Amino acid sequence: MSASFVAIANLKGGVGKSTTTLMLADGLAYHYGANVLVVDFDPQANSSQMMLTERGLQMAYEQGKGVVSLLDQFADGAPPNLADLILPNAVTLDELRKAEQKDQRRGWISILPSHPSLRFSEMEVEERLYGQGRRPSELASDLHRHFAAALEPVKSLYDIILIDTPPYLSPLARAGLMLAETYVTPTLADPVSIWGTKQFSDWMAGNIAADIATRNFIVVTRFKNTRYARDAEHELRTIYLKNRQFGPTIPESVQALQAMDRADLDSYNTMRGKYGNLRGDVRRLSESFAGFLATRMGITAPQLVRN
Ligand SMILES: Nc1ncnc2c1ncn2[C@@H]1O[C@H](COP(=O)(O)OP(=O)(O)O)[C@@H](O)[C@H]1O
Ligand SMILES: [Mg+2]
């Protein structure tokens, strides 16, 4: 059984893409025993930072791990090779680590991390290839081919591959979108985010996935329960994104900030300690998404059965 590829994507920044990536990774590993690979395609490296801390992602970079090295392989014309670039441990939940120590692994998270220098590596590749007369869409396709070939030999090791993407459509970002079979789109219930979400959806339909509506899972995040936000959410469900599957609405909570903030590379937290009163939301999000994969996509990985 090969992993299912999921991009967490929206053209709007700050809508909770990286936070949703983190919650899905934790929720699917913790509640379903899924073996998750997180691929961070955003040079902002937020999901890498949340899982590895800043020190950890710097160490990974210095050891030649991560997406930067994958892009270097591409730039050098080297054969794609991913196995050595993945960090096999991006677990922050104590329960998962303890089970592993007792040889009773019940869900795990690995990561292909990003690093801020990805921005510059990407610009260098772009400059060189555009100088040779290549076009952005060709570069996106070439990158997609390289990444798909790199993932091919390792994808059977994972149940699910979560690709966190940046809020724009650079060739690297497009390659990430092209890898995915399903799209998780976090959005806020406000007009500016709805606008960004709609643009994303229209662009995807025209360029990458004509059937995006059936493969799109929407998560309204940072929800403040006001009349205004309720109306905006209602419009999203009934007008702009009708026929999409909606996951649970995630409330605005300082717990989300705490969950993002790993103290150090060797510090772990329980599900309760990390997510507090958001842990029910993490569970509902993973349940709802596993249900979406099963019913809409026909993906019923045996590993995605609830623990
Ligand atoms: N449910 C939430 N409640 C409060 N703050 C949140 C919540 N989800 C995300 N945030 C915060 O909102 C900001 C943007 O979230 P992030 O996941 O980084 O978005 P993106 O990846 O789309 O740019 C971050 O500071 C994050 O901590
Ligand atoms: Mg992000």
Image (cartoon, rainbow, N blue to C red):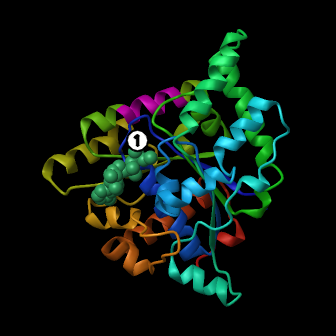
Residue under label 1, please give it: 242
Residue 78 vs residue 1, the one in the foreground: 78
**Could you say where residue 206 lies in the image, as x and y percent from the top left?**
56, 24
Q: Quick one: SS at disc 1?
A: loop
Q: In the displayed structure, would residue 161 be above or below residue 132? A: below
Main secondary structure along the magenta-highlighted residues? helix
Which image quarter holds the C terminus? bottom right
The N terminus, quarter of image? bottom right
Res. 231 in view: yes
Outermost residue, bottom direction? Answer: 102
- Residue 211 as seen in the image, left or right of residue 10: right
Residue 302, how many percent across, how many down? 71, 71
At x 20%, y 48%, the residue is 229
Relative placement, left or right, of 52 versus 83 is left
Please say if 119 is above or below 103. Answer: above
Locate residue 187: give its quadrant: top left
| Residue 281 relative to residue 33: left or right | left
Task: Please report the residue visible at 60 percent of the width from the left and 30 percent of the height from the top.
Answer: 122
The residue range painted magenta reads 196-204
The residue closer to the viewer here, 22 or 48, is 48
Q: Position of residue 197 (x, y in %)?
A: 39, 36
Amino acid identity at mark 1: Lys
